Image (tube, helix red, strand yellow):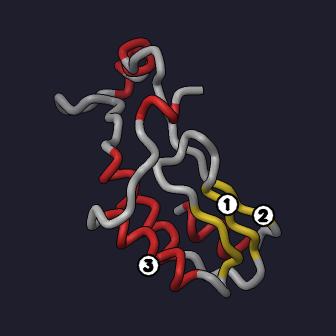
Amino acid sequence: ASALLMNAVQPDFLSTLVVSFPLGSQRHSEGFSDLAQDGAPGFLELSSQEVLTEMRQFVERLELRRTIFRSDHASNYLALKGVLGRDKARLLAELEAAELGKVELRPEWARGL
């Protein structure tokens, strides 16, 4: 849904952030407990691998023409910079390399804000 919205809007600038919990996620998770259904939790924290997969799927679905893309905030496991659509193939290659463990990710201690 996010990629469809971005494709429709064609923003000048697009940036991503990753939720981090430097003090632990318990308090945050408890806030979602009322959203739990059928025994499933209302909130699940993604692993670094799941975040990379989600980011790759997001970028794959983007059809942008001249959008400055940044995913270089301290919260991100992998710093990405480019212009979409020009740099889409390179960004996807960087994400795939990270998913395969060929690129070092930002360590958890460096993601705390």
What residue is drawn where x is 36% and y is 15%?
26
Q: Residues within 10 Å of mark 1 (few under 14, many from 20)?
A: some
What residue is drawn where x is 75% and y is 70%?
68
Q: What element carries label 2?
A: strand
Left or right of residue 39, residue 47 in this image: right
Please tell me which of labels 3 and 2 falls first in the chain: 2
Q: Name the residue under label 1.
A: 70
* Total count of labels: 3
Q: Which amino acid does label 3 sit on?
A: Ala
Q: Measured from the top left, where is residue 74 in percent x and y?
A: 60, 41
Q: Residues within 10 Å of mark 2 (few under 14, many from 20)?
A: few
Quadrant showing the C terminus:
top right
Query: In which quarter of the view is residue 32 placed?
Result: top left
User: CA separation, marks 3 and 1?
Assistant: 16 Å
Q: Name the residue under label 3.
A: 93
User: CA separation, marks 3 and 2?
Assistant: 21 Å
Q: Measured from the top left, where is residue 50 in percent x and y?
A: 32, 52
Q: Measured from the top left, where is residue 43 in percent x and y?
A: 36, 31
Q: Name the residue under label 2.
A: 13
Q: Is mark 1 on a helix, strand or loop?
A: strand
User: CA separation, marks 2 and 1?
Assistant: 8 Å
Q: Measured from the top left, where is residue 24 in percent x and y?
A: 40, 17
